[in-house]
Image: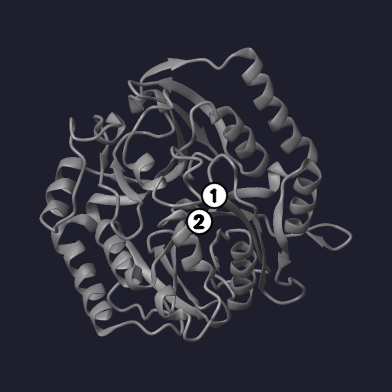
Amino acid sequence: MAFDYAGYQPKGDKKNSEFFNEFRQRIYERRKSSGIEDLVGNMKSLVMQVEPGTSLATMIELYEMTPYRHTASYIGDTHKFHVLHSRPVFPALILMEPLSAAFEEYITRVNRMYPLSRATPHSRYVGEIYESVSNDEVRKALEDQAVRFEYSGEVENPFYAADGFLFTMPSDFTGNRVGYSGLNFNDPDSLGLGGRYALTAADQAKLDEAADFAEASGVGELLLGVDHMATRILAADREDAILEFLTQVPYYFWGAYNIMDMNSSTNVNRNGSVMDDKLSPAKVFTANNTPSFVNSFENKPMPTETFVRNYGRRMHHIAIEVQDGDHAAGEKNVDFVVGTLKEKGVDFLAHVVGECKDEPNLKQIFSKHSKNTILITEYVERCHGFDGFFTKDNVAALTEAAGQDEQFKHGQVFD
């Protein structure tokens, strides 16, 4: 049964404008009439870029902290590409590494604008690729709706205009791209990323060691897949960012909740065609309620906008779902995973929040920012069939913990 986009009533206590409510429905209608509803499917791959020389360290981190495993590597004109998979039905991950530290593009230009992203000018979560029936038809439909795409010869990284791929230009509201492709991401040789090459024996041994840790410790089998990903944006861009995203993919606005203690809102968008978010993970946007330039009147916390002021509009964290259950002596699986990773040297922000006793609930925690990807990894265990998406108390605690780790001391303003 098709999801009833028009009839769905969003959840939450965050009030949206009449503009947002009107155009959300009009976007759903236009997606159907323009064909986007039929042309674009589930998320097929995540895409991120790291500093030259750090892709191996990043993959080791992914092996230890996520279910992703290396499948194949390629060298293109400007980048190395590593393709990783978790399960065949879940989105793949494409990890890009510039061949030269001197490579310049949008990512390096925007990263150098912000004080806490300048040290890693090449590192950024890029966006996602969604299944496409026809890139040409998607381009035609969305260009008629003022969506801008990359063209060959107009972008420094040729991957964004390669055969079989279609990428938007970075969003003015989020900095993220949306990609489309009809290629088979479970067959990385078909993606045309460049010449295939084998990792050195020494590099492969390091990955094997990380895989052995995940298997022997019991952590690996408990990490299921990507549950959601969250981008932090400015207060004034919240509604525009959501509507832009809904224009480009067949997701729906699930709802938004105020996190009053942290002066922010959490805005969730989900794919209506899947029963399991891990098949096409939810996209979350978080933004201040009171923007920084007037917040001094009320002096509320503002960790969400602080992050944007220090790092720019960008992806903040990716959440991995932990299999629900008790590991031993009543310890929940997420507690076991976190404890084991701490022993391995992974740093976390604060402690696991939420309780899972006899009632449906959530337990969650944030890692510290990865030095390789600048992303936080969240672990979330949805206990006893919890059917919501999040709890406000948990989000407030996680937001506060992250905010304390994302400050930039400048003059008399410590944010």
Q: Is residue 304 above or below residue 48?
A: below
Image quarter hosting the C terminus: bottom right
Residue furthest front as drawn: 411
The mark found on residue 196 in the picture is none
Among the 4 quarters of the image, the one containing residue 81: top left
Residue 290 sits in quarter: bottom left
- 70 vs 261, nearest the viewer: 261
Q: What kind of element bears circle 2?
A: strand
Q: Are marks 2 and 1 in contact (CB under 8 Å)?
A: yes
Q: Residue at x 68, y 39 (%)?
A: 64
Whole-percent x and y of residue 213?
A: 75, 34
- Residue 127 in sight in this render: no
Res 375 label: 1
- Location of the N terminus (image quadrant): bottom left
Which residue corresponds to mark 2? 316
> What amino acid is found at the position of numbered circle 1 in the picture?
Leu
Q: Amino acid at mark 2?
A: His
Q: CA distance from mark 2 to mark 1?
A: 6 Å
Who's the residue at 66% across and 73% down the image? 361
Where 115 falls versus 103 (above or below)? Answer: below
User: Which callout, 2 or 1, points at the residue further toward the start of the chain?
Assistant: 2
Q: Is residue 362 visible?
A: yes
